[in-house]
Amino acid sequence: MHPTRKADDQTVKLRAVTVEPQNGRMEYEAVFKPLRPTNHWYLRVEDASGIWRVENKWIVSQGNAVNLTPMDKLFDNGKQAASTEQ
């Protein structure tokens, strides 16, 4: 997502690069239309139903890859929920 120009936002499908998780991680790639020059973009990955999402800021000068990781507090809430169900 462009930081100020919604018209420059893009939606793409991700393709798995790894077949199975490696060290608990999967790697994906996507092909974008040419991007307008800017210092940063916002990236969001979400399911088609809009139930969950992971997002981060991509600083263009730091390279073509970005790490998207769920917030730790989401994992903590999941552990608490699981322990109360038992």
Image (cartoon, rainbow, N blue to C red):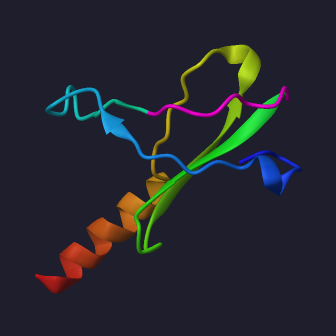
Residue at figure coordinates x 47%, y 72% from the top left: 50
Answer above or below: position of 35 versus 50. Answer: above
- Seen from this angle, which residue lies furthest front? 33
Answer above or below: position of 54 versus 41. Answer: below
- Residue 86 x, y percent position in the rendering: 10, 82
Q: Is residue 72 left or right of residue 56?
A: left
- Residue 36 x, y percent position in the rendering: 81, 31
Image quadrant assignment for residue 84: bottom left
Image quadrant assignment for residue 38: top right
- Residue 27 x, y percent position in the rendering: 33, 30
- Seen from this angle, which residue lies furthest left? 86
Answer above or below: position of 76 versus 20. Answer: below
Residue at figure coordinates x 16%, y 84% from the top left: 85
- Seen from this angle, which residue lies furthest right? 4
Task: Name the one closer to the observer, 37 or 56.
Answer: 37
- Residue 68 x, y percent position in the rendering: 49, 40
Q: Is residue 59 left or right of residue 76?
A: right
Q: Is residue 69 left or right of residue 41?
A: left
Q: Is residue 34 magenta?
A: yes
Give, as a single range, the part of the protein colored magenta. Answer: 30-38
Image quadrant assignment for residue 48: bottom left
| Magenta residues, dominant SS class | loop
Q: Is residue 51 magenta?
A: no
Task: Name the one closer to the observer, 19 or 35.
Answer: 35
Task: Name the one closer to the observer, 57 or 8.
Answer: 8
